Image: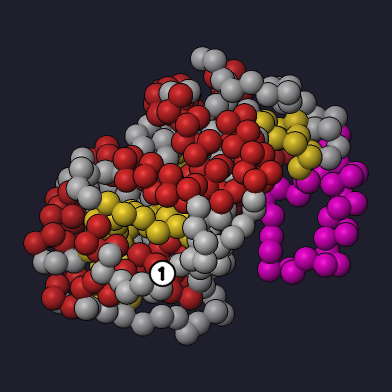
């Protein structure tokens, strides 16, 4: 596999213990001026990054299996992104699209209309973050339907704003102490094959959710049903086949807007442009962010033209929404995905990584489940012989990998899932080496 070239050596090399002395100096400076509520998974300070590695200020190079939480899908400082951004910065950095518009915003909307599921007429509105996109998708659904209720699912994560915290299922660290939250939010069970009753199909799991929504809320009161097609922070949960389609069909039959939150799973991450594409499901609205712009802050709501046009002029927008530099980055990132075959590369990563993870599972009783799609893979860790979550071992394995120069992330409602989100430009050699470090950590600690 040929990957994006970079000046940074594509190897893991530790010149100091982690964190090194320069990172420790920066940590001391940080403690005086950065809010304590802002935490970091790995206390090393980054100097450069590219391909499949991150280089810190002490000269250590670490294997990146996190992509800044699925953001640097095309790699850090991807050449097409750098070129587009450099040209745009030289032209202008901001005018505000709501004041004096520009072509870059339009071009991104054109690409979103082309790439998102369905062949119907589509329009977009651009924002800054995934949470902002979700919040605006709910605004659009409520306005278009004249209804108020919104249904989300168990294990959901949709953001940290007031409304999106209400949609998010996990209390710590996202919700504790921050209420009261937005009203008219209701939660129903999702499809979680590892933890659902044995043999439960996707259609049966969907009917369970639909029944609760109809009894607790009433279909005619629901503006939107929102869910991540593959859940992110909740544990990289892939619903059983048929679940998404059944929910989408029920929404269509009842005039409910089906919102697919593709903030983490979109833009080639799963081996398709969007995770719903694996099921052939066409949402009414799609929210995107993270991987859309190669590391610059950009988000979008894309959906059926009649829904997007329902809101009165001036009802959507924001000062920085669709910033021209971020739009230029998105055009460079999407071009990279298309020209470098990153959808196929995601499928290749899944094949290579899953084979290694299955081998690891066979000799590690604490690994209860291996799941995911493309470059969005997860390991659920349990007490051997049970399905009881083992958050303590999960944290210990992650810490050991960090000490050995491999960036991995944890997630899950129960804190017992290791998630793997490598840049899709990572080499097979670095990927396999990172997984070997992970395997060694399990052998030592599990």
Q: Residue at x 86, y 37 (%)?
A: 58
Observer able to see residue 167: no
Looking at the image, the residue that sits furthest to the bottom is 180
The residue lying toward the viewer, choosing from 306 and 59, is 306
Q: Quadrant of residue 305?
A: bottom left
Q: Is residue 230 above or below residue 364?
A: below
Q: Is residue 38 left or right of residue 427?
A: right
Label 1 crowd bin: few (<14), some (14–19), many (20+), radius 10 Å:
some
**Is 82 colored magenta in this rendering?**
no
Q: Mark 1 highlights which residue?
A: 316
Looking at the image, the residue that sits furthest to the top is 1
Could you tell me residue 179's position as x and y percent? 50, 82
Look at the image and tell me in which quarter the C terminus lies: top right
Could you tell me residue 68's position as x and y percent? 60, 45
Q: Residue at x 31, y 40 (%)?
A: 114
The residue lying toward the viewer, choosing from 338 and 223, is 338
Residue segment shown in magenta: 16-45
Could you tell me residue 273's position as x and y percent? 36, 37
The residue lying toward the viewer, choosing from 212 and 150, is 150
Secondary element at tag 1: loop
Q: Residue at x 18, y 55 (%)?
A: 248
Q: Is residue 408 left or right of residue 301?
A: right
Q: Residue at x 13, y 76 (%)?
A: 220
Looking at the image, the residue that sits furthest to the front is 100
Q: Quadrant of residue 176?
A: bottom right
Q: Is residue 220 above or below residue 283?
A: below
Observer able to see residue 87: yes
């Amino acid at each position: 596999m040929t990957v994006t070239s970079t000046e940074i050596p594509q190897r893991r090399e530790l010149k100091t213990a982690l964190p090194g002395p320069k990172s420790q100096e920066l940590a001391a400076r940080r403690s005086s001026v950065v809010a304590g509520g802002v935490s970091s998974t790995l206390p090393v300070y980054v100097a450069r990054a590219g391909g499949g590695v991150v280089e810190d200020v002490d000269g250590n190079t670490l294997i990146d299996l996190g992509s800044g939480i699925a953001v640097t899908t095309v790699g850090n400082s991807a050449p097409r992104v750098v070129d587009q951004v450099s040209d745009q910065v030289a032209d202008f950095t901001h005018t505000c699209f709501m004041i004096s518009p520009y072509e870059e915003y339009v071009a991104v909307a054109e690409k979103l209309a082309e790439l998102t599921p369905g062949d119907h007429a589509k329009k977009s509105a651009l924002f800054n973050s995934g949470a902002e996109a979700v919040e605006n998708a709910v605004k659009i659904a409520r306005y278009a339907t004249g209804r108020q209720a919104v249904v989300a699912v168990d294990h959901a994560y949709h953001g940290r704003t007031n409304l999106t915290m209400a949609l998010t299922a996990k209390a710590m660290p996202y919700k504790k102490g921050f209420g009261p939250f937005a009203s008219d939010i209701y939660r129903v069970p999702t499809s979680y094959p590892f933890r659902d009753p044995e043999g439960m199909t996707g259609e049966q799991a969907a009917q369970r959710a639909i029944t609760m929504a109809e009894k607790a809320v009433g279909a005619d009161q629901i503006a939107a049903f929102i869910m991540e097609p593959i859940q992110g922070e909740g544990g990289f949960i892939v619903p059983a086949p048929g679940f998404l389609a059944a929910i989408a069909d029920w929404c269509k039959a009842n005039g409910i807007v089906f919102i697919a939150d593709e903030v983490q799973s979109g833009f080639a991450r799963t081996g398709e442009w969007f995770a719903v594409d694996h099921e052939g499901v066409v949402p009414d609205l799609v929210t995107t962010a993270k991987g859309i712009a190669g590391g610059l802050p950009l988000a979008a709501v894309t959906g059926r033209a009649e829904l997007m046009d329902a809101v009165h002029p001036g009802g959507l927008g924001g000062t920085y929404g669709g910033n021209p530099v971020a739009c230029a980055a998105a055009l460079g990132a999407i071009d990279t995905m298309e020209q470098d075959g990153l959808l196929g590369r995601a499928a290749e990563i899944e094949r290579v990584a899953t084979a290694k993870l299955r081998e690891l599972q066979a000799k590690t009783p604490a690994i209860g489940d291996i799941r995911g799609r493309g470059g969005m893979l997860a390991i659920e860790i349990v007490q051997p012989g049970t399905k009881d979550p083992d958050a303590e071992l999960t944290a210990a394995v992650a810490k050991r990998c960090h000490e050995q120069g491999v960036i991995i992330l944890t997630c899950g409602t129960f804190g017992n899932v290791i998630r793997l989100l490598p840049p899709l430009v990572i080499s097979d050699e670095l990927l396999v080496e990172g997984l070997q470090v992970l395997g060694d950590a399990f052998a030592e600690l599990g």
